[in-house]
Image (tube, helix red, strand yellow):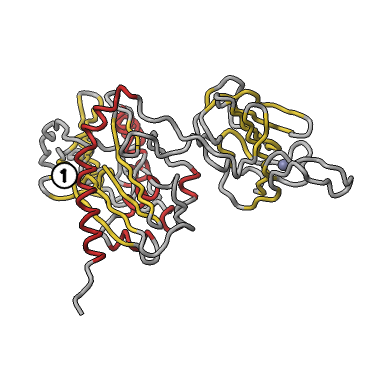
Amino acid sequence: MLIGRTADSLASIPERLAQPAVERPYPLPEIEVATQEPLERLDADWLEHRIRPGESFYQIMRAMGFDPGTVQSVMESGQQTRPLLELRPGQVLRASAPDGVLQALDLEIDSLNKLEIRRDDGGYFAQLHTRPTQTTQNQAAGVIDSSLYLSAQQAGLSDRLILELAEMFGWDIDFTQDLQPGDRFAVVYNEISVDGEKVRDGDILAAEFVNRGKVLRAVRYTDPNGRTGIYKPDGSSLRKAFNRNPLPVTRITSRFNPNRVHPIFKTVRPHRGVDYGAPTGTPVRVTGDGRVAFAGRQRGYGNVIIIDHGRGIRTLYAHLSRFAPKLSAGQPVEQGKVIGYVGSSGWATGPHLHYEFQVNGKTKDPLTVALPQAQSLPDAYKRHFTKQTARWVAALDALSTRQVAESTAKPMP
Ligand SMILES: [Zn+2]
């Protein structure tokens, strides 16, 4: 599976987890990178400003006394100036203008990255400097007593790692409902440091979750083409090829029922899908990878999208208020992509999504139909996979064994 945060997996994480706590700042390189020597510091005085919420680069530069033309020239000094448009509170901006003309500008993007802009004949040029990092491994384990969040925090995991852990197993465990006191977890993860000092957590390499006695394991693997995914230790996929629901489940107003008797006509009018009550405009996400087979109007369905997933499976999304921009027949769509928005077009009494799941032309109950697993690792990668992941699985074994020993060790009477 490609690492992605689908609405479905997020929905199954407790609210506290879903809050983006530590956000990955500017995309950072994981492994050692060659670093250029920072340019020579100018002797002149530097103006320094710590970014506050809501401030823009333009405002700050104007406040420092630079004219709009200078700001413009700086912005035009290259692609690398992008962080100036994405300033975050706490970052530090320094400017040097000994004769009133901006000579140098530094932005401390984060503990690893620094943007340096220098005056060049007539214009400015920008360079991004990255401090070399080291990657080491760490591990943590814990037993759940009330919530995953609290127990994982006690075990020393950062918010980011807790969220990643919950996402890894989000396909198999509903963290809002399935957890039981005594469930436990073990995690092996990367730590990124600079000059021996930890600056942040890296990715989870392997994890184990024991839920109601059932052992689930996951490992991270990057194939020779650079595609990273999360797999079971045997190389099979952890995720399902389909999400159960096309939008976060708020209210199911009508279930699949082939024998529904119409309340007024007293005749059998089957309901071949599930209705999700949701406000007009709520994004609807395609439940599996596929291609748009139809996007347009059909009498009762109103604005409707039909997705062909291959293997005889089709899904249908009806009563939409509108389609995602540029959606058209034949277009490939990836699981979790927003394809349209809830509405009440067609024969609908109020805004809701009508969702159908068809297998070889027959409609099935979307809430109970057996969902196929996503594809496993190709055989060609199996050896590479085992080689890359064996250490982390072994580390997990050791961690898990120790955890069991500790939890069963009873004090002597
Ligand atoms: Zn319906």
Residue 58 rendering spot, x and y as whole percentages: 37, 41
- Determine which quarter of the picture holds residue 312: top right
**Residue at figure coordinates x 61%, y 21% from the top left:** 329
Q: Is residue 185 above or below residue 288?
A: below
Image quadrant holding the C terminus, namely bottom left
Above or below residue 77? Residue 111 is below
State the residue lying farthest toward the top: 330
- Residue 52 visible? The answer is no
**Residue drawn at x 63%, y 26% as measured from the top left:** 360
**Quarter location, residue 98:** top left
Left or right side of 337 for 53: left
**Kind of residue at disc 1:** Thr
Where on the image, by quarter, is ligand 1? top right
Q: How many marks?
A: 1
Q: SS class of the residue under badge 1?
A: strand
Residue at the front extreme, as displayed:
413
| Most foreground residue, 91 or 373 | 373
Q: Relative to 122, say whether 340 is above or below.
A: below
Indicate the position of residue 161 as horizontal and vertical percent values: 31, 50
Residue lying at 77% horizontally and 43% vertically, measured from the top left: 259
**Residue bearing the label numbered 1:** 136
What's the residue at 69%, 44% (across, down)? 256
